[in-house]
Image (tube, coloured by chain):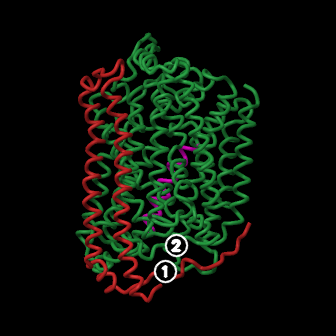
């Protein structure tokens, strides 16, 4: 392979660094740094939300799952869009109306700020860290494959880490948002082009395309040639526990998306709740179009490239780049690869800014220093310093976990968001009786239940034959105690139960008295944070 | 890098402050009750509908795979069409919500104006 992928990577890096420089001159003050002065337009924020959401896991991962397991992979695509209805109908507007920088702002209104913010910050950092490790390990593996011989795993991880630190430290939310917007546009363009090329391959006949999908030929695990109908359900989720796992996955997506901190912070970057609403609609148009096109990416890779070839040329995650190569040669391969790289970089930056915002705003200023900045600019300074720390920790973890199977970490991030964050946000907006003890127990139970159940799930427990080596081996060599890969079906009800029981065993009159204030603020936007001037 | 902060934002009070009794009064006013009722009549049914419609997919695909594999148009089966329909249903619900929300905005605007007038035209 030529130098073209490397050149495309460098062009993207140069453009984003230029944006960071521009943004750094406009990022003075907390509202500018954490929320881009709340001046992002609806469509811009919509694209950025879509960009934050369409991570490498969706671009490379979904294409790969569909290429190998057909229809069942497409079910991920469906859940990822429908989940935005929860964001639109329940979360986005109240959050924008009543909060400032983080989801904990909404909780802190009527509850005791310190314990609630401390727990919410812990949960935010947990979700962001899990998600980030998955992205960073993916970045390392991807760059190593794409730039074989030029860049090794550690160099790739360190490079991504340093870039993300630069974006976040110097450019704040404004730079992160624009990096996300550019990447999302590139990703949509690349996906559209790839989809058109796939249809061109089938002479623009859906009959031919679906005919090919119904007869995918490959070698199964035993080396026997099989012909499968890839439109048929059940290639991934097999009985006895498959259907239940599928429902559990759906629950984690539908309730988890509205609890993902890096998505929630985006709604503070727009001027008001109405714009927040419009940005969700923009995001839904983009996300929906993208995930419908995974039909072409995934099934295209299955029919045109074939599972056998993908398996021997980098594995499932390379399905989309290999499809590009098969359809239009090495320059298009380089373009799609550069998009995948841009995707990882932008998502990692988005995760970092949500983690650092929560640490400095929730934990440092409000928990440690009781809501008072000791000197002007302290909150932003702490955020910048913590971006360095988050970046360094992410680089270190990604290098240590290099050979580990980290795919389950994204599922874990969704499970924690759905089981810990969502129940307390919803209950604090809608339930008058809700109180501090309920929020703390809800967050704690949701967090522990999701992590605990994943630890004893087939993602980490399983008995491998001696032939399975290295990263493919399960961490705990024993039969899984919990049969599902996705804990949502159990951990979400546990999160709600924890929050409800915690509330009922304690008594806190002030939280009930202040419910009316939150109710009015979140539903009318009375006294909501206004957009600032640049 | 412009590092100086222009103002201390955390220590600043909210732009709109009111006493407990003011919040209670707004919350109990007819206008606010109307707003909440109008919101509920759209959001609750819409939420229930999309959750039921969405979970019908994994339930049917998981527990009735043979039925869902029924071919409808050429090689395209019921499972794929039902999955595809989810995208359009989600878009339609979002569009209906935006339309309904214009109504919410109108009702909320009255409450806002009244509240700010009471504060002395802030």
How packed mark 1 is, by other alpha carbons closer than 10 Å (few <14, some 14-19, many 20 or more), is: few
Give the quarter of the image for residue B54. Answer: top left
Question: Which chain is assigned red?
Answer: B
On whether residue A127 falls in the magenta region, the answer is: yes
Query: Does residue A479 appear left or right of residue B120 in this picture?
Result: left
Q: Quadrant of the N terminus of chain A?
A: top right
Question: Which color was chain A given?
Answer: green
- Over which residues does the magenta segment extend? A117-136
Q: Position of residue A352 (x, y in %)?
A: 58, 56
Q: Which mark is residue B15?
A: 1
Q: Position of residue B56 (x, y in %)?
A: 26, 38
Eyeballing the image, is A393 above or below A250? below
For disc 2, the chain is: A
Q: Quadrant of the C terminus of chain A?
A: bottom right
Eyeballing the image, is A433 above or below B67? below
For disc 1, the chain is: B
Q: Main secondary structure of the magenta part?
A: helix
- Looking at the image, can residue A111 be seen? no
Q: Position of residue A489 (x, y in %)?
A: 30, 45
Eyeballing the image, is B113 above or below A161? below
Q: Are marks 2 and 1 in contact (CB under 8 Å)?
A: yes
- Looking at the image, can residue A139 be seen? yes
How packed mark 2 is, by other alpha carbons closer than 10 Å (few <14, some 14-19, many 20 or more), is: some
Q: Which mark is residue A530?
A: 2
Give the quarter of the image for residue A339. Answer: top right
Q: Residue drawn at (40%, 21%), measured in percent from left and top?
A: A230
Secondary structure category for the residue under label 1 = loop
Q: Which mark is residue A286?
A: none
On whether residue A347 falls in the magenta region, the answer is: no
Query: Does residue A34 appear left or right of residue A250 in this picture?
Result: right
User: What is the CA distance from the residue labelled 2 to the residue labelled 1?
Assistant: 8 Å
């Amino acid at each position: 392979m030529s130098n073209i992928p490397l050149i495309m990577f460098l062009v993207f890096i140069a453009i984003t660094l230029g944006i960071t420089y521009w943004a750094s001159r406009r990022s003075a003050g907390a509202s500018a740094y954490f929320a881009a002065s709340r001046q992002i337009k609806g469509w811009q924020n919509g694209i950025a939300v879509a960009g934050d959401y369409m991570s490498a896991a969706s671009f490379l991962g979904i294409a790969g799952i569909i290429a190998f397991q057909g229809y069942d992979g497409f079910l991920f695509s469906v859940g990822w869009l429908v989940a935005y209805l929860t964001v639109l109908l329940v979360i986005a507007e109240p959050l924008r109306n009543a909060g400032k920088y983080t989801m904990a702002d909404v909780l802190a209104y009527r509850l005791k700020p310190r314990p609630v913010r401390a727990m919410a910050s812990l949960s935010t950092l947990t979700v962001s860290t899990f998600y980030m490790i998955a992205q960073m390990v993916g970045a390392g593996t991807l760059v190593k494959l794409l730039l074989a011989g030029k860049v090794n795993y550690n160099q790739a991880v360190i490079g991504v880490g340093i870039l993300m630190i630069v974006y976040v430290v110097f450019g704040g939310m404004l730079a992160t948002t624009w990096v996300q917007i550019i990447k999302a546009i590139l990703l949509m363009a690349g996906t559209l082009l790839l989809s058109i090329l796939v249809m061109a391959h089938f002479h623009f006949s859906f009959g031919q395309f679906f005919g090919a999908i119904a007869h995918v030929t490959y070698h199964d695990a035993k080396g026997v040639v099989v012909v499968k109908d890839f439109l048929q359900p059940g290639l991934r989720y097999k009985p006895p526990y498959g259907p239940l796992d599928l429902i559990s996955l759906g629950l984690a997506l539908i309730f988890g998306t509205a609890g993902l901190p890096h998505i929630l912070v985006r709604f503070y970057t727009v001027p008001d709740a109405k714009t927040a609403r419009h940005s969700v609609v923009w995001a839904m148009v983009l996300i929906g179009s993208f995930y419908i096109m995974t039909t072409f990416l995934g099934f295209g890779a299955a029919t045109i490239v074939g599972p056998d070839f993908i398996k021997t040329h980098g594995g499932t995650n390379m399905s989309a780049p290999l499809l590009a190569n098969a359809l239009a040669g090495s320059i298009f391969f380089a373009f799609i690869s550069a998009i995948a790289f841009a995707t990882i970089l932008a998502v990692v930056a988005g995760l970092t800014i949500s983690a650092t915002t929560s640490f400095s705003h929730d934990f440092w200023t409000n928990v440690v220093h009781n809501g008072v900045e000791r000197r002007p600019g302290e909150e932003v300074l702490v955020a910048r310093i913590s971006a360095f720390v988050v970046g360094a920790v992410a680089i270190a973890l990604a290098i240590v976990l290099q050979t580990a199977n980290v795919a389950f970490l994204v599922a874990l991030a969704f499970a924690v968001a759905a089981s810990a964050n969502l129940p307390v946000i919803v209950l604090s907006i809608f339930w008058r009786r809700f109180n501090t003890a309920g929020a703390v127990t809800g967050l704690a139970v949701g967090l522990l239940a999701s992590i605990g159940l994943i630890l004893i799930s087939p993602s980490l427990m399983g008995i491998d034959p001696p032939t399975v080596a290295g990263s493919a081996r399960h961490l705990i060599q024993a039969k899984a105690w919990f049969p599902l890969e996705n804990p949502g079906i159990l951990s979400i009800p546990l999160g709600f139960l924890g929050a409800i029981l915690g509330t009922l065993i304690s008594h806190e009159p002030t939280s009930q008295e202040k419910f009316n204030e939150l109710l009015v603020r979140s539903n009318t936007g009375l006294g909501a944070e206004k957009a600032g001037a640049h | 890098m412009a590092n100086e902060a222009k103002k201390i934002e955390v220590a600043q009070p909210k732009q709109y402050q009111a006493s407990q009794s003011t919040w209670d009064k707004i919350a109990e006013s007819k206008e606010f009750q109307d707003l909440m009722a109008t919101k509920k009549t759209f959001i609750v049914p819409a939420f229930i509908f999309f959750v039921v419609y969405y979970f019908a997919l994994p339930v049917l695909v998981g527990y009735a795979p043979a039925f869902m594999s029924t071919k409808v148009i050429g090689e395209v089966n019921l499972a794929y069409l039902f999955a595809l329909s989810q995208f359009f249903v989600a878009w339609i619900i979002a569009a209906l919500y935006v339309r309904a929300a214009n109504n919410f905005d109108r009702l909320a605007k009255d409450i806002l104006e009244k509240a700010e007038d009471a504060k002395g035209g802030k």
